[in-house]
Image (cartoon, rainbow, N blue to C red):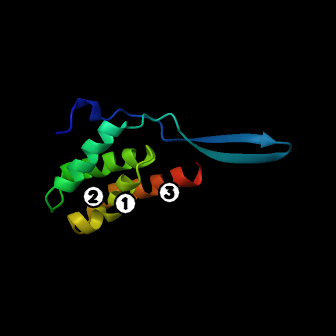
Amino acid sequence: MLTNYFEFKKSVWTTDKIFFSGQKVVRKLVVNRQIRKYNQDEIQLVLNAYETAKTGLDDSKIEIANRLFIAAISGDNQARQYLKEFKNKFGTLDGAYAEAYNDLTVMLDLWDKTN
């Protein structure tokens, strides 16, 4: 069972830094690396939630995807793999679910590129 320490806290994900370097305007996208990461116990709870979830898509599955994302940026390779396999397990994503999932994959790519 996922407990209250999984409650989401709004955080700034990226910051656009715009500054001058001589006569040139420079824009730099900075990912917030201070986002709280999961510990091993929390990661295990997330992995178990994914593994035991039934097929079919609903809001609770998207919550699992969000938690897999945090577990992945916390350094867990299994969570990263599960996030990639998410669509295969839960079926076709459309509408808001597809948008939420795509946002997570873009954010993970950005995390990796700026690491």
Instruction: Give percent across and percent down for residue 114.
Output: 59, 50
Label 1 neighbourhood size at 10 Å, few (<14), some (14-19), many (20+)? Answer: few
Pointers 1 and 2 in contact (C-beta within 8 Å): no
Closest to the observer, 78 or 55: 78
What residue did someone put label 3 on? Answer: 109
Q: Which residue lies furthest to the right in this view?
A: 22
Pointers 1 and 3 in contact (C-beta within 8 Å): no
What residue did someone put label 1 on? Answer: 81
Total labels drawn:
3
Marker disc for residue 97: 2
For the residues carrying marks 1 and 3, which lies nearer the camera in this image?
1
Q: Which residue is drawn at 46% across and 35% down?
A: 35
Judge from the rendering whether residue 103 lies leftward or rightward of residue 50; answer left or right: right
Q: What residue type is labelled 2?
A: Tyr
Rendered-image quadrant of the N terminus = top left
For the residues carrying marks 1 and 2, which lies nearer the camera in this image?
1
